[in-house]
Amino acid sequence: MEKPSFTELKELYQKPSLGCGTGYYGKILLPQHTTTHVIKPITNYIPQKPRGFYHDKKGDLRYEDKPTILIKKNKYDFEENYTESEQLLNLNCDCWSCVKCRTHLKNKLFDNAIREVNYHHMANHMILTFPGQNFRSTFTYNESYTILSQEIHKLNRRITYAITKLKEKKAWPYQHEFLYDYGNTLPEYDYAYIRFTRSQNNPTENNPIGYCHDHIGTNYPFNIRWLNEVIQKNNMKIGYTFITENNNFLNYLQRDFLTDEEYVIPLHARHYNTSENVHLNPSQGFLNNDGSIVFSKTANFETIDKNLWQKHNQMLPFEEYIKQFYTVTLTKPQKILSGEYVNGELKKLLPEKKR
Ligand SMILES: [Zn+2]
């Protein structure tokens, strides 16, 4: 099949998927449940010290090489007891390309990301891009996602390799130190990362529209020189490695994370990736949920009602019976009565004309 152009892909992302939320995917009976909801605003971050050359208080020129990451503790608030009552719902398609489902997925992903970032202290923000002009004239925007993903996978293996070297106190095979602040000493916690794959939507001459870039949050503050050394040595196709000006990952989550147009990525590409110790799945997750029951798209009200009673000794939510009553009544042909109406309400019935 012909790959869609980026413009066509964008159009696809503006529509709901066919059949989403109409019952095409079936129905689900969700029991009463409690969800975790993040209350915003969530963070207070402290701006960084200047980096590069700067003048100190005495007016001497100094060079600051280390980014400073300061996050206030206890800045997250969770509302834990958010209770939803029992509901019978049409299943959604749960696709990122569906405009209806994306809103839900993004919000859930945001909440989960905040929780995990907090838990693993993933304060550091890196942006990795597909390399410049040469590569962009050889590969399509579509290919850039597969290539960058493979290259970052390689980079992750180098990171794991470096961690093993340090843990086993083996000779350090690199010119540069591994981390800022820590140097070649490992932090006391395990490495964790979250990677969000996004598309370029503000094209410049050397940076055309649609190509991918990744926002990565990590709990290890990588030394950018070490990263560049590894990328060059292994000839990886990774364009920039930069630790952004707003080096705080939370800053990205709060500001640009929800920018919808950056979510337009090829259908084969994954929107997020994490290390094994991070749990981010934002999809409804109903199927394995406690007590939820899913019905096929062919199941009608009677089938569902009977099944629940016979197999689960349970009734549908009361509103469903009311809804059913109205649906049945309203689908019967209605006879329009002729008479006098005041504010839509029938006040006086006129006698039917004789034929
Ligand atoms: Zn959908």
Image (tube, rainbow, N blue to C red):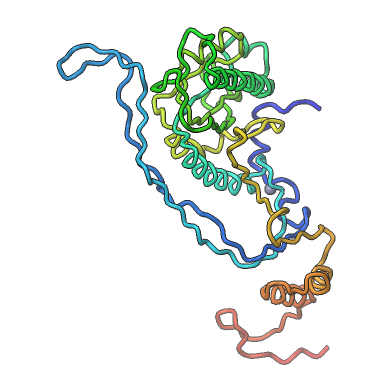
| Position of 299 relative to 36 (above/below) | below
Q: In which quarter of the image is residue 292?
A: bottom right
Q: Viewed as shown, does residue 201 lie left or right of 270?
A: left
Q: How many marks?
A: 0
Image location of residue 120, percent across then percent down:
49, 38
Front position in the image: 351 or 226: 226
In the image, 277 versus 47, the foreground residue is 277
- Of residues 221 and 330, the one nearer the viewer is 221
Left or right: 150, with 203 as reference point: right
Residue 158: x and y, percent?
A: 59, 17
Measuring 42% from the left and 47% from the top, which residue is drawn there? Answer: 76
Q: In this view, does 61 lie above or below 309?
A: above
**Image quadrant where residue 29 sits:** bottom right
In this view, which residue lies farthest toward the left? 58
Q: Which residue corresponds to the image point at 54% horizontal and 32% vertical from the top-left?
A: 192
Q: What residue sits 75% from the left and 51% below the top?
A: 19
- What percent of the width, then of the height, locates residue 31? 66, 65
Q: Quadrant of the C terminus?
A: bottom right
Residue at 56%, 12% in the rendered image: 231
Which image quadrant is residue 13 in? Answer: top right
- Where is residue 137 drawn, in percent x and y? 64, 11
Q: Is residue 152 shown left or right of residue 338?
A: left
**Rendered-image quadrant of the N terminus:** top right
